């Protein structure tokens, strides 16, 4: 057993999970609306662009402590996280949207934690990742998605999301963020499987 986790990445993944859980509960208990999330997304984008020229104290703290260096758009991961949740919420039936969001919240962080700690077998789609991490991401996110959808849908959504998470998708030389890809792929897979069943 080897445990070789980067402290910065651990902090990022924990924040990812915490923000995701808070947003999920706010959605489940209808405390926020899609309009609120859209306004938050626009505000985040505006603050990201502003932070290219100015140091905004609270934003700067989060960028320095939790964001990978992204000179084009600071806070890109958070913005894509909000966009992924909003799109899943609006595109899919409620139960599939919630399952997609929970897969977004847990699949990638669990994959990272387990992969960094115990992973040995290189994943054929992405040489930087390993099979053990991906399997853990699929299993944990499937078990949590079962709260919203059937086991078959949960597994199909988690499996599809983790497969696509490993594929680098670029459009016009802009790399799509996995925070946007994961919920869309998970929801689409569950929707398609649901149509077949």
Image: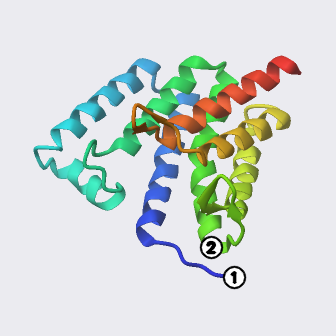
x, y percent for residue 14: 49, 58
Would you call the spot at circle 2 few (<14 residues within 10 Å), some (14-19), or many (20 or more)? some
Q: Who is closer to the viewer here, 14 or 167? A: 167
- Residue positioned most to the right: 197
* Residue 35: image location, x then y, percent: 40, 18
In front: 79, or 36? Answer: 79
For image coordinates 76% across by 22% down, the residue present is 192
Q: Is residue 134 above or below residue 25?
A: below
Residue furthest left as drawn: 54
In the rendered image, which quarter contains the C terminus? top right
Label drawn at residue 144: none
Where residue 153 sits in the image (x, y, percent)? Answer: 79, 32
Q: Which residue is mark 2?
A: 117
> For residue 157, what is the image quadrant?
top right
Say if mark 1 contacts mark 2, CB within 8 Å. yes
Give the answer, above or below, for where 118 lies relative to 42.
below
Whether residue 7 sits left or right of residue 72 in the image: it is right
Q: Which element type, helix, strand or loop, lies under badge 1?
A: loop
Question: Which quadrant of the rendered structure holds the N terminus?
Answer: bottom right
Secondary structure beneath dot 2 equals helix
- Label 1 and label 2: CA atoms lie apart by 7 Å
Residue drawn 35% across and 29% down? 41
Q: Which residue was labeled with disc 1?
A: 1
On the picture, is 63 further left or further right than 82? left
Q: Residue drawn at (63%, 49%), measured in percent from left and top?
A: 107
Examine the image and state in which quarter residue 29 appears: top right
Residue 154 higher or lower than 112, as above or below = above
């Amino acid at each position: 057993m080897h445990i070789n986790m980067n402290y910065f990445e651990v902090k990022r993944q924990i924040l990812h999970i915490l923000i995701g859980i808070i947003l999920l509960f706010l959605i489940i208990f209808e405390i926020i609306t899609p309009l609120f999330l859209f306004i938050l997304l626009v505000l985040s984008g505006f603050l990201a662009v502003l932070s290219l020229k100015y140091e905004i104290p609270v934003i700067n703290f989060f960028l320095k402590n939790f964001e990978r260096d992204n000179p084009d758009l600071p806070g890109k991961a958070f913005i894509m996280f909000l966009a992924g949740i909003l799109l899943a919420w609006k595109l899919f039936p409620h139960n599939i949207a919630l399952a997609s969001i929970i897969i977004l919240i847990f699949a990638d962080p669990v994959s990272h934690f387990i992969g960094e700690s115990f992973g040995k077998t290189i994943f054929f789609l992405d040489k930087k990742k390993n099979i053990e991490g991906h399997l853990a991401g699929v299993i944990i996110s499937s078990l949590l998605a079962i709260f919203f959808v059937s086991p078959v849908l949960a597994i199909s959504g988690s499996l599809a999301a983790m497969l696509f998470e490993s594929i680098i998708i670029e459009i016009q030389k802009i790399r799509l963020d996995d925070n946007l890809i994961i919920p869309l792929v998970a929801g689409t897979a569950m929707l398609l499987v649901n149509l077949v069943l």
